Image (cartoon, rainbow, N blue to C red):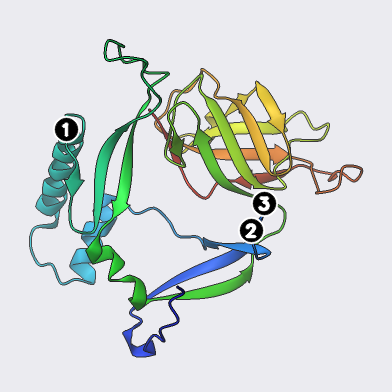
Amino acid sequence: MKNNKLVDPDSLLHRIRVKLYPSYLPKVEGKYIARTNNQKSLSIEEVCNSMRIRGGFDGNLKRLIEYIQLYYDEVAYLLCDGFSINNGYYSIYPNIGGTFNSTKDIHDRKKNPISFRFGIRRKLRQLFDSIAIEVDGLANTNGFIDTYTDVEENSVNETFLPGNQFIICGSKIKVAGDDPGIGVFFVPIEDPTKAVKATRIAKNLPSEIIGIVPPTIEYLLYRIEIRTQFSGMVDKPLKTKKIIISDFTIESA
């Protein structure tokens, strides 16, 4: 049953701005999908600084940052020992993918990849009705990257490993043209000049690219860049290449 409950405008304490993108999803009603508009990823330091400016925290900011970092280090340690963590807003738990043939099988990291999954808890769900969504119109139609999936890691827009198969989904992302600089690139946040090109591409379509992560990954955080002359029409390539950049970062595992 659909929830048609009217929301009191005075209860809307938060705003999320979105842009609409053409939908490439099959058998789904509607022409567009919404994506948050230029929402940056905040660090622990930035969240703590917001606690000081907006939340009124008047303690030692440096010590607060150190304590929270220690907390997350301990969370990571306990997750790696098989515990799940529930902070009231969301839970995190370890997950082992793939299948086993018998109780005597030895864990195979490729066949049974380790990942961590998140679940929304009650405190966060209760905030849904206090959020207003504001549509800022259509996004740039030159193309966009929606998701990056590491197949072996079963990870979406999160982690990746050199040598693993990846699937990139989006719109107008096909690599095409005669410019020598076109391709799928892994671009390190720390030094964008050290971008690495994926040379093993198995599938190259306007909405999906499948390939293998190059082995020469040296940094921690990367963005995906697709550099192409694809215009959306096979017989009318762009005169110069366009660059489509993921609005998310992925971490080398």
Judging by the rendered image, the residue that carries numbered circle 3 is 26
Residue 182 quadrant: top right
The amino acid marked with disc number 3 is Pro
Query: Are dots 2 and 3 in contact, CB under 8 Å?
Result: yes
Q: Nearer the viewer, residue 140 or 32?
A: 32
Q: Helix, strand or loop at disc 3?
A: loop
Label 1 or label 3, whichever comes before in sequence order: 3
Give left or right: position of 23 versus 39. right
Q: Position of residue 84 (x, y in %)?
A: 19, 41
Judging by the rendered image, the residue that carries numbered circle 1 is 77
Q: Position of residue 49 (x, y in %)?
A: 23, 61
Q: Cα distance, mark 1 to mark 3?
A: 40 Å
Q: Cα distance, mark 2 to mark 3?
A: 6 Å
Front tag of 1 and 3: 3
The amino acid marked with disc number 2 is Val
Front tag of 1 and 2: 2
Question: Is residue 17 in view?
Answer: yes
Q: Is residue 135 above or below residue 95?
A: below
Q: Residue at x 16, y 50 (%)?
A: 65
Judging by the rendered image, the residue that carries numbered circle 2 is 28
| Label 2 neighbour load within 10 Å: few <14, some 14-19, many 20+ | few
Q: Residue at x 18, y 66 (%)?
A: 52
Label 1 or label 2, whichever comes before in sequence order: 2
Q: Is residue 134 above or below residue 77?
A: below
Q: Nearer the viewer, residue 144 or 169?
A: 169
Q: Residue at x 15, y 49 (%)?
A: 68
Rendered-image quadrant of the C terminus: top left
Give left or right: position of 90 versus 156. left
Q: Helix, strand or loop at disc 2?
A: loop
Q: Helix, strand or loop at disc 1?
A: helix
Residue 83 quadrant: top left
